[in-house]
Amino acid sequence: MTERGGPRVSALLLAAIAFAALVAAAVQAGADWPVLALAFGSGFLAAGALSLWWLVAPLCEVVAACRAIEEGNLETSAPERGSPELRTLARLVNGLAADLQEILLLFAHMLRSLQHAWSVLGTGGAGLSDDEREVLGAARDETARMQEVITDFKYYRVALRGGVFVDTGVPAPATHGGVDHAALGERT
Amino acid sequence: MSPPAKVLLVDDSAYSRSRLRRFLAGKGVGEVFEAGDGETAVELYKEVHPRLVLLDQVMRGPSGIETAQRLLACDPTARIVMLTVVAGGETRELALACGVLDVLGKADWDALTRVVDQELCD
């Protein structure tokens, strides 16, 4: 039973018992069969709608998160709620987004190193043949194109500033010694 | 004979944790524990008392710095090395001021090798 599953089932049972009591009272009071049928039907519909909401709403949230990730928004998180299976699914989706971000940022780091290498090789142009310079130029262009792909994504707590990726989850330091002492709090 | 060294890896990326695990296996590290978020890391730390914590900064939920603060609140002698894939002088300054041993780039295997050798081979 999920953390919220127990109370939900109890609430549904209580509602079912209350509904049954109402119907029994209606029968005793001599209510017509069509009225009773309508009451039963409404009760079942309400129970069905509640169950569907409990199952479907978290699933819709996971699907929305998947769509956002597919569009390059790695900032999104699927809420981990609902049945155990749905919570596991949400956790796995969030894990995949974290993996994708990790790989992309490592790739960005590698590309920056490559660009630096190209720029160093480029300055030694006197020693390169025309063919070698052409190959080097093509490699530089390809590296730049790959970097553009990486900057198309929206990252979780990371942003591109001045051509490098920085951690946006850290508060900007106070001017006092370059360290935000207020954010650190007291530590013995 | 001293007990095998325990290392706790904290990173929300399973891929990153598996890279670090392979690296530590190559170094012959005895026992490696993993946590996917800060809260789990604190609970696991209290349970296993690792000799070294390798902690990612950018994580969903509590950040690496927040997690380091909680770990150090539990155990002021905790040995924590922060790993980050992004640049940021503020991250480094804040982390070191919190009591983290060092802040290393995730692609800097040489630096990580030095730190692991230093911390686990004493």
Image (cartoon, rainbow, N blue to C red):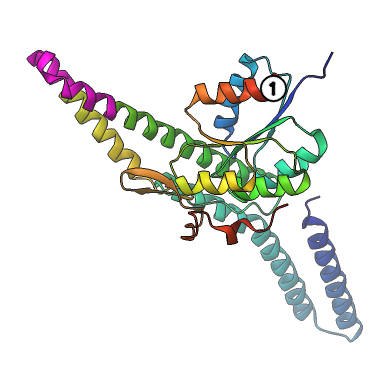
- Looking at the image, the residue that sits furthest to the right is A28
Left or right: where does residue A5 sit relative to residue B121?
A: right
Name the dominant secondary structure of the magenta segment: helix
Magenta part of the protein: which range?
A115-136
Q: Report the front residue among A59 and B56.
A: B56
Residue A87 at least partly seen: no
Q: Residue furthest front?
A: A177
Residue A127 in magenta stretch? yes
Residue at 58% from the left image edge and 36% from the top image edge: B102
- Please give the chain letter of the residue carrying mark 1: B
Image quarter of the N terminus of chain B: top right
Q: Is residue A164 left or right of residue A98?
A: left
Which residue is found at the position 56% from the left and 43% from the top?
A: B57
Return the x and y of residue B96 as percentages of the image width and height: 58, 43
Q: Provide residue B10's location: percent of width, then percent of height.
A: 64, 37
What residue is disc 1 on? Answer: B120
Element type where label 1 sits in the image:
helix
**Residue ID at (42%, 37%):** A105
